[in-house]
Amino acid sequence: MSNKFSGVLPHNRSVLAWVDKVIKLCEPAKVHWCDGSEEEKDRMYAQAVDEGLLIPLNQEKRPGCYLHRSNPNDVARVEGCTYICTESRLEAGPTNNWEAPDKMYEKLYNLAQKSMQGRTLYVVPYLMGPPGCPLSKVGVEITDSLYVVLNMRIMTRMGQVAWDELGNSRKFNRGLHCMLEMDPKKRYIAHFPQDNMIISVGSAYGGNALLGKKCHALRIGSYLGRQQDWMAEHMLILGVESPEGKRTYVAGAFPSACGKTNFSMLIPPKKYKGWKIWTVGDDIAWMWPKEDGRLWAINPEAGYFGVAPGTSESSNPNAMSAIQKDTIFTNVALTEDGDVWWEGMDGPPPEKCIDWKGREWTPESSEPAAHPNSRFTAPMKNNPAISHEVDNPEGVPISAVIFGGRRKTVVPLVFQAFEWIHGVYLGATMGSETTAAAEGVQGNVRRDPMAMKPFCGYNMGDYFHHWLQIGKKLTNPPRIFHVNWFRRDSKGKFLWPGFGENMRVLRWIIDRCHGTGGIETALGWMPRVQDMDIEGLPGFDEKKFHEVQHIDTEGWIKELLAQEELFLLLHDRIPKELVYQRQLVLSRL
Ligand code: OXD
Ligand code: MN
């Protein structure tokens, strides 16, 4: 081994051959094979500080925590530059950008050529999912970004554990990430599902560059899941423990930056003595039907890449504990005492701080101090409410699936699908207002089926079909629900208090899983006022309950009309079952 190489090489020949090919292409000055050890971690953080990539925070207040400022042109996922490169355009479907694999390989290999000269190439072996789980997958990300390496170390099970799981197998995801010169015109996030391959260039932002997350666990994962009878979903997983100690597991799909992290870490209000919520995952669920006829789930990740603004002791105390140590903050503000700050944190804003672009900031400044999509990368083991089951290779059995969007009007707080196919229809037609998690205009309602619009690695019509097929394998399927925490009154005020009080909605959902408490309406099963606990909610009464649950017939008919666009877009692949469901809602209304 020449001194160009450091770290521990695996024995796997396919890995060695592929890395060799990339080295010849990118011509790095050095190559480091990551082992995931503590010693390696300490060395890398010291190096990242030396290189100015990370700013150490106040180590007494936040041990092991660092701040990173990204290039201001690189702050969110870029859906316009994200491609699914299947053999045919039809296979990728109309909700994805498509390019022929040969053409895209050629373009990206040209861009990657010699791109690591004078730099270090890192080989990052990682495992998505607990060791020993039949669904867990190995990936190898090659990157020239030390920031990416350090984030991958938190977000995945990184290092030797992945080589141990892989053995001599050729089945691993190949991920190549090159920073290039951060020119938005040379930014591509390309997926080659047939080759189990990802190439990402020109961005170092989370979802574009931490390839285990959106690229592998969702886009490639969904493609593999369809072939192998499992599901890769943009879902949180939580366990609800009753005072009697009974645990019920729930999965929930909400679009990016709509509160999945907060919901997965919910702390029940005081009156829910003895109730406890355990976090299994906050962003991604891999699920499969087992012989018992139930749907089982794992969280493939090992950390949280959470949205910082709005995270506070009142909105999410567990997240605030999780980011107390060993966390990387990206694009938040830096306070005078070396701590972090963002809009929506507890207490008054600091009199002075340094904003996410490194400029002096005061409360009078016209721009926010933290970028609206600024993030924390924290190990899941830091979360005081982490589930005891996160490392269980058997997963957890899912009793309820919740779909939810961010909607000011029309969509009630909660209702339940009549059965699986109706539930799939509800997920498929989900609409939500766009957020800062992706580049583009914010606040427009867009269809985001199952919160997977940006993440489905194949034709969305086929994806709905896959949901229906999985349903046929479930003799005891999860019950399916729709929620909207964000409905507002005529004055624009939120009708529902949200956060910890969402426990009350969850409680109704759990009751429904056991078959009690509700009435049939045109939209689905709904709680009557006596079915849901609204006692002791400040400013919320029976009148508000009816307002937040109101079925706005005209508004809903408009909603059905708005769904037309999606149905037309997918007309050649959308399962007939979903078309009938839409007709049924219309006739019930
Ligand atoms: C995320 C996202 O980062 O959905 O989880 O954008
Ligand atoms: Mn997400």
Image: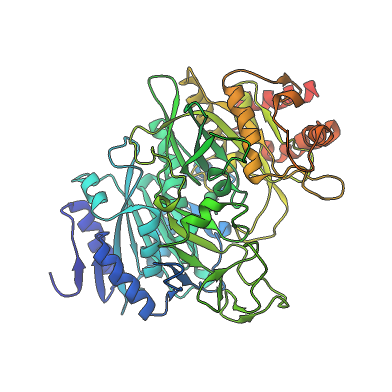
Residue furthest left in the image? 1
The residue nearer to you, when weighing 557 against 506, is 506
Asked whether residue 91 appears in the rendered view, the answer is: yes
Side of 463 where 423 appears, left or right: right
Residue depicted at 72% across the width and 75% down the height: 366
Asked whether residue 570 appears in the rendered view, the answer is: no
| Res 115 quadrant in image | bottom left
The residue nearer to you, when weighing 185 against 487, is 487
Residue depicted at 49% across the width and 56% down the height: 321
Where's the C terminus, which quadrant? top right
* Number of marks present in the image shown: 0
**Relative to 495, is 65 above or below?**
below
**Relative to 485, is 474 above or below?**
above
**Relative to 466, is 334 above or below?**
below
Side of 561 where 53 appears, left or right: left
Residue 545: where, in percent of width, then height? 79, 34
Residue 295: where, in percent of width, then height? 45, 27
